[in-house]
Amino acid sequence: MNDNGLPSVNSKWGDLALRSLSTFVLVPIALYCVWQGGIWFQMFLAVLAVLIAHEWADIVHDGSERAFALLALSGMASVFVSETQGLDAACAAILMIWLLSVLQWVMRAGQGSIWGLLGVFYVGLPIVAFVLLREDTPWGRVAVIWCFLIVWAADICAYFFGRLIGGPKLAPSLSSMTTWAGLLGAMLCASVSSALFAYEVGLIIKVLDLLAFSLTWVETSGDIIGTFMKLSFNCI
């Protein structure tokens, strides 16, 4: 706070350095792994699954190591079973792990949030989707890079538009951070990024722009739900 009782510039942009550093480090790694495919992409997804599992366990399960182990196992099965045995086997493995999580919940006499029963699917199913998308011929590699590009563009522009313009909140009862300005900035940048990408790879710009708008809404909704969950579980 400054002398007038208003948020200072430093507090407003306090996380910019960390965000910038993570972007410059992680984006090249992600693109390399997607481009190479094979074991590189599998290991990238495995690390991503562990990070998602860790965050969910921290929020919903109060950092329970047992819950984290089941969630991480779901992520590993999503990567390596789907790669070696196919979609049906991966879904069966995820279902079995989910039944173990249900058994764990029952043994605790239903203690804890019902959200805890969704974690296995939250971790496992998106990873399976990325594995299957990357394996598509001939557009799998391009499709995954496009997905990453749109999410990155939307996230970065939502951050800057939201802080520079501010204004009314998108869903104040669910999230105190997401603004309409941030959403509009995210949609604009996602559309421009998608159009440039489509032009470069020779795809239909209008179709990808419509998909970019849809993905931006999904990404923004995910941010809102994530913030709401953290508030509900007193994590922020």
Image (spheres, helix red, strand yellow):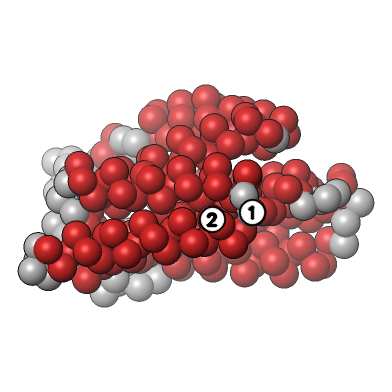
| Amino acid at dot 2 | Ala
How many angstroms separate mark 1 from mark 2 (CA)?
A: 6 Å
Please provide percent x and percent y for residue 35. 72, 34
Q: Please name the residue that numbered disc 1 is placed on.
A: 86
The residue at the point 55 percent across, 42 percent down is 80
Q: Is residue 175 left or right of residue 38?
A: left
> Which residue is disc 2 drawn over?
90
Looking at the image, residue 214 lies above or below residue 123: below
Residue 91 x, y percent position in the rendering: 52, 61
Query: What secondary structure is found at the residue carrying circle 2?
Result: helix
Q: Residue at x 62, y 29 (%)?
A: 40
Mark 1 is on which residue type? Answer: Gly
Left or right, 218 with respect to 66, comes to: right
Residue 10 visible (yes or no): yes
Q: Nearer the viewer, residue 15 or 152?
A: 152
Q: Secondary structure at mark 1?
A: loop
Quick one: label 1, few (<14), some, or many (20+) residues within 10 Å? some
| Residue 14 image offset from top left, x and y in percent | 31, 35
Q: Residues at badges 1 and 2 in contact (C-beta under 8 Å)?
A: yes
Label ID, residue 47: none
Q: Is residue 127 visible?
A: no
Around disc 2, counting alpha carbons within 10 Å, would you say few (fewer than 14), some (14 to 19), or many (20 or more)? many
Q: Quadrant of the N terminus?
A: top left
